[in-house]
Image (cartoon, rainbow, N blue to C red):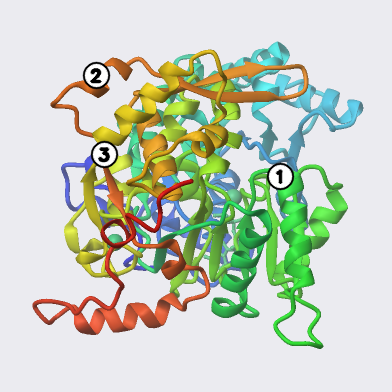
């Protein structure tokens, strides 16, 4: 962890800043040491804990970005004991809060939580404590609130005002602080309400905590919370031990399952992993498929469990626990399986379908390899999945749903640029060409593997076809079926259509019925430019997907490629590009 986290120098002009916060001669330093050993029974601080505690106790605003399980809670719990008054913690996950309160009570620290399930009497009592009623002799140090409480309860704000006026509002902690930002993967509207705190309570310092946030999100958070000068401690953005790759998934459901099963059996046998699925039903289907397939005759199959919001609390907890203990190897989950997961040895995160945004993808796949050992982030991509996600993206309240989805599609269509570079570029992070170190599928294959091709002629054919048949409605799948483009095979037609949608030559046309949403394709706002002689629609051409099927052991492949990459011209171990060789044989009927 030591070199993993570094101070973000945007926040300072003083290079000695880190050392300044590592000092142990602050007025509170001996107390901090005492409480660490005698109350929390912790032998030593982990990286950034002491620094954050010192910043916080200096009454300065701070944001700490540290992986889940890194020990962020201690950074406010310890100062809360030292400081007079009550520390307010805003945290969205009631179950995790209950665990924290329980743990604190065991340490004899008075902590409580106020949420919708808090019993009425206790609510009243907490209100009285905040009021500072003389007859109540309170030892309350830490009060957890949900963001909903703050956004929806005027009483709470009035009580916090009272707390502030009587100088007992010690500090504001914002857990999962990335939820403040719309650019984040988990924006929660109720968090927006926190923006008034700095104005309302200018003397209360703010400490924001999160496991993942990009520079863009952090800038946004700083602006929304009004803490432009906060001190920032952050883990680096580039996770060096994660290998990123995209695999083309079969259009046929059964084959797609087999590809997934093969991939897990051959590459991650008995290893711990997560398979993210698009819907609850998908998660259940995938789970059944994995359980059904054994590598050997007498095998029971892959030990898989299912996790989604449609399951009861206890059964979710049980699956999670069995996974932590490695009794279950693979969790098939929706994105409900997220925050608070801190299993260190997750060897793979597979997206059985693409995520709704790169932000989500980065966050979800980032749950692999917390122990710094090599781990894999694999995305199974196919055309059809895009149009299952598109209606959801279209109705997304943020209004950015489709734009976010298009960036994700671009990541999947890409066959020529380093995957991590694309992710870094998307987040406006600094990128150096050798930062990947052969840890993505693109960087480990010969450059001859792909070729770019201007498909503007084929694009014109597609647009013309739609214009000519404007009385008919085409779903994307139907369009692919009906099109006849002699120079292209199906998968490339699919890729081209996606590119045309991203570039606005085509667009989706959503039809909402009471039961579902149908997505059709129609000519887009730029359709008329497709006939322009300067029109360039370039897509990456790849060789037959068969050759990149999921059961090749990519790791071996990578070794070979690494070795040969020093010779000036790496021998092309692959068959010639399908584009060149297959023109006749792929003629569509
Ligand atoms: P986070 O909020 O960053 O995900 P937590 O605050 O919940 O992590 O802490 C995770 C675990 O690490 C807790 O069990 C906590 O007691 C433990 N922990 C925190 N700091 C230390 C430390 N310095 N040394 C050992 N264990 C620690
Ligand atoms: Mg936490
Ligand atoms: Zn790369």
Residue under the image location 17 percent in, 46 percent down: 14
Looking at the image, residue 100 lies above or below residue 548? above
Question: In this rendering, would 463 be left or right of 79?
Answer: left
Secondary structure beneath dot 1 equals: helix
Question: In this rendering, would 338 be left or right of 482?
Answer: right
Q: Residues within 10 Å of mark 2 (few under 14, many from 20)?
A: few
Which of label 1 and label 2 is nearer to you?
A: 2
Please give the residue where the numbered disc 2 appears in the rendered image: 529
Residue under the image location 72 percent in, 19 percent down: 131
Give the Cα distance between marks 1 and 2.
Answer: 56 Å
Which is nearer the eye, 373 or 456?
456
Please give the residue where the numbered disc 3 appears in the rendered image: 455
**Relative image position of residue 203 (x, y in whole percent):** 44, 24
Marker disc for residue 488:
none
Secondary structure beneath dot 2 equals: helix
Q: Residues within 10 Å of mark 3 (few under 14, many from 20)?
A: some
Question: In this rendering, would 579 be left or right of 480?
Answer: left
Give the Cα distance between marks 3 and 2.
Answer: 14 Å
Q: Residues within 10 Å of mark 1 (few under 14, many from 20)?
A: many
Secondary structure beneath dot 3 equals: loop
Which is nearer the eye, 271 or 202?
271
* Residue 438, image quadrant: bottom left
**Relative image position of residue 167 (x, y in whole percent):** 56, 24
Residue under the image location 32 percent in, 55 percent down: 583
Residue under the image location 36 percent in, 47 percent down: 488
Please give the residue where the numbered disc 1 appears in the rendered image: 97
Answer whether residue 4 is visible to the viewer in this image. Answer: yes
Q: Are marks 3 and 1 in contact (CB under 8 Å)?
A: no
């Amino acid at each position: 962890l030591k070199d993993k986290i570094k101070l973000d120098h945007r926040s300072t002009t003083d290079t000695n800043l880190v050392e300044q916060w590592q000092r142990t001669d602050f007025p509170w330093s001996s107390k901090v040491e005492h409480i660490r050993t005698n109350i929390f029974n912790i032998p030593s601080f982990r990286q950034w804990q002491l620094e954050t505690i010192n910043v916080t106790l200096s009454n300065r605003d701070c944001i700490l970005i540290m992986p889940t399980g890194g020990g962020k809670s201690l950074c406010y719990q310890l100062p809360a004991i030292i400081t007079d008054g009550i520390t307010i913690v805003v945290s969205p996950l009631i179950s995790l809060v209950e665990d924290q309160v329980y743990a604190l009570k065991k340490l004899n620290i008075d902590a409580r939580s106020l949420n919708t399930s808090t019993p009425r009497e206790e609510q009243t009592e907490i209100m009285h404590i905040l009021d500072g009623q003389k007859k109540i002799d309170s030892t309350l140090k830490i009060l957890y609130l949900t963001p909903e409480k703050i956004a929806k309860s005027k009483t709470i704000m009035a009580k916090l005002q009272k707390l502030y006026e009587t100088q007992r509002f010690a500090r504001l902690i914002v857990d999962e602080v990335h939820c403040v930002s719309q650019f984040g993967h988990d924006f929660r509207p109720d968090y927006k309400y926190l923006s008034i705190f700095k104005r309302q309570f200018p003397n209360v310092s703010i400490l924001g905590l999160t496991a993942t946030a990009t520079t863009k999100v952090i800038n946004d958070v700083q602006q929304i919370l009004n803490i432009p000068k906060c001190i920032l401690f952050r883990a680096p953005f580039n996770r060096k031990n994660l290998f990123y790759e995209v695999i083309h998934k079969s259009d046929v459901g059964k084959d797609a399952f087999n590809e997934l099963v093969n991939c897990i059996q051959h590459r991650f046998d008995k290893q711990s992993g997560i398979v993210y699925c698009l819907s609850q039903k998908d998660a259940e289907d995938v789970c059944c498929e994995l359980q059904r397939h054994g590598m050997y005759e007498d095998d029971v199959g892959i030990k898989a469990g299912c996790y989604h919001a449609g399951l009861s609390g206890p059964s979710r907890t049980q699956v999670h626990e069995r996974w932590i203990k490695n009794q279950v190897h693979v969790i098939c989950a929706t994105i409900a399986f997220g925050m608070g997961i801190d299993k260190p040895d997750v060897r793979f995160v597979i997206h059985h379908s693409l995520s709704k945004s790169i932000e989500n993808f980065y966050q979800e796949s980032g749950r692999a390899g917390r122990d710094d050992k090599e781990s894999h982030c694999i995305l199974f991509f196919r055309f059809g999945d895009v149009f299952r996600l598109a209606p959801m993206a279209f109705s997304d309240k943020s209004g950015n749903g489709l734009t976010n989805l298009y960036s994700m599609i671009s990541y999947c269509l890409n066959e020529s640029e380093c995957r991590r570079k694309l992710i870094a570029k998307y987040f406006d992070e600094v990128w150096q060409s050798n930062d990947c170190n052969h840890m993505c599928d693109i960087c480990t294959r010969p450059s001859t593997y792909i070729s770019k091709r201007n498909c503007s002629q084929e694009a014109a054919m597609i647009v013309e076809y739609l214009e000519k048949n404007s009385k008919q409605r085409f779903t994307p799948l139907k369009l692919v079926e009906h099109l006849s483009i002699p120079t292209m095979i199906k998968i490339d037609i699919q890729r081209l259509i996606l590119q045309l949608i991203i570039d606005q030559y085509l667009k989706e046309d959503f039809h909402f019925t009471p039961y579902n949403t149908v997505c059709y394709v129609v000519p887009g706002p730029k359709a008329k430019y497709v006939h322009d002689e300067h029109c360039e629609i370039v897509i990456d051409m790849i060789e037959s997907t068969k050759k990149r099927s999921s059961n090749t052991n990519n790791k071996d492949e990578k070794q070979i490629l690494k070795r040969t990459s020093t010779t000036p011209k790496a021998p092309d171990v692959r068959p010639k590009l399908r584009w060149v060789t297959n023109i006749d044989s792929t003629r569509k009927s």
